[in-house]
Image (tube, rainbow, N blue to C red):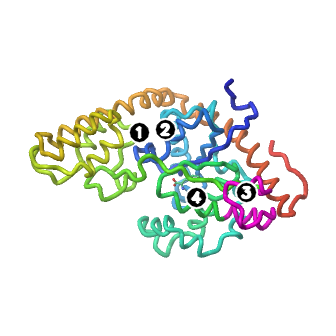
Amino acid sequence: MTSGPNTPTSKPRILTGDTPTGRLHLGHWVGSVERRVALQDKYDCYFLLANMHAFTTRFDKPADIRQDTIEIVKDWLAAGIDPKKSTIVLQTEVPAIAELTWFFAMLLSFNDVMGNPTLIHELETKGLGDSHSFGFPMYTVGQCADILAFRPVYVPVGEDQAPHIEMCRKAARKFDQLYCNVPNRTEDKDYVQAGGVFPIPEALIGRVGRLPGVGDGKQKMSKSLNNAIFLSDTAKDVQKKINKITTGRQTPTEPGDPTNILFQFVDAFITNEARVAELKDRYARGDNLGDGHVKQELAEAINTLLEPMRARRAEYEKPGGDDVIIDIIKDGVKRANVVAEETLYLAKTAMKLDFGKRLLS
Ligand code: TRP
């Protein structure tokens, strides 16, 4: 039996999301999106559009954030996320998330937040320095609420998000111990059984933790570093961008390093394992295998992956496509609020804030 969106389901829940800062690229695919597509049947999946978080750095660009939000949903659907199976959650339409953020902000210390390695890295690389808003660091607490509002068992994310998931686990443990009398020696997997409102969710780190960007391989793939291959790129663009990979190798007969940036891409995208082994072997021996040839095979493999995505995306790029997306978002919001409101009610009850149940129409 298949369970549709309105069928109550006892499947364990999953939550993950993206900040709408632009189109999705191959780093997102191998880091998390691929996983999401695969998990849709087995789990009750919630995919969150972190549009509130987009305001932490781009509060002066509301129109861009709106359009990026719509574009990311197109990318998701193109990638194979099925809104009939999975629920799309628009962060700003789920008030329980903002409310839970306040509660979790009290359970985490200032140093937990400011010492978060991903946050520190962002403060450095985004050039925010001392001038970042008060709200910027708060997104990390908000992310705990994004996750816990859905009480999921797993959070599929790229490696860079691991510190955020750790913070979320800390907040969940603390809440359950403090307000639900869960003994502090309880094993993470037993928190709900021991009376906790929140499970201690686990990160599922993607198949490829960190995909380099096209170039010399020093930076990770990122839109802002201008080294990304987008899921919506044309076949020609893919080949052009792959050609930008530089290994420093001079000739096809020079023994090459089969773990270099080019082969990190080969490992990530050429699915025929025997072929990968053969390429590595010849490359390492300098057996007349030029970087150019490897790049061509690589671009073909990537284009084979992206072709069905381009076809699905084209459907939403027709006139009226944005309206279809907005309807999908509205439908997701309704379903998301059922779960998030229930969580908030349970949390408030545990906190002795049970002054009546409210209804979001
Ligand atoms: N911070 C994540 C990113 O930039 C996006 C995100 C927001 C998220 N809320 C989340 C991811 C909750 C997982 C779970 O990629």
Tag 3: Cα neighbours inside 10 Å, few (<14), some, or many (≥20)?
Answer: many
Separation of disc 3 and disc 4 at Cα?
A: 16 Å
Residue at position x 77%, y 53% from top?
Answer: 193
First of labels 4, 2 by sequence position:
2
Separation of disc 4 and disc 1 at Cα?
A: 26 Å
Residue at the disc numbered 2: 75
Q: Name which quarter of the figure residue 297 lies in.
A: top left
Tell whether position 183 is magenta.
yes
Quick one: quadrant of the N terminus? top right
Separation of disc 2 and disc 3 at Cα?
A: 36 Å
Separation of disc 1 and disc 3 at Cα?
A: 39 Å
Question: Magenta residues?
Answer: 171-196
Of 46 and 76, which appears nearest the observer? Answer: 46
- The amino acid marked with disc number 2 is Asp
Query: In the image, is 90 to the left or to the right of 287?
Result: right
At numbered mark 4, what does the secondary structure look like: helix, strand or loop?
A: helix
First of labels 2, 3 by sequence position:
2
* Label 1–label 3 contact, CB within 8 A: no
Query: In the image, is 252 to the left or to the right of 79?
Result: left
Residue 230 percent location from the top left of the image: 39, 42
Q: Which mark is residue 165?
A: 4
Quick one: quadrant of the C terminus? top right
Tag 4: Cα neighbours inside 10 Å, few (<14), some, or many (≥20)?
Answer: many
Give the number of the mark in front: 3 or 4.
3
- The amino acid marked with disc number 3 is Tyr
At numbered mark 2, what does the secondary structure look like: helix, strand or loop?
A: helix
First of labels 1, 3 by sequence position:
3
Q: Which mark is residue 231?
A: 1
- Does ligand 1 reach within 8 Å of label 4's beta carbon? yes
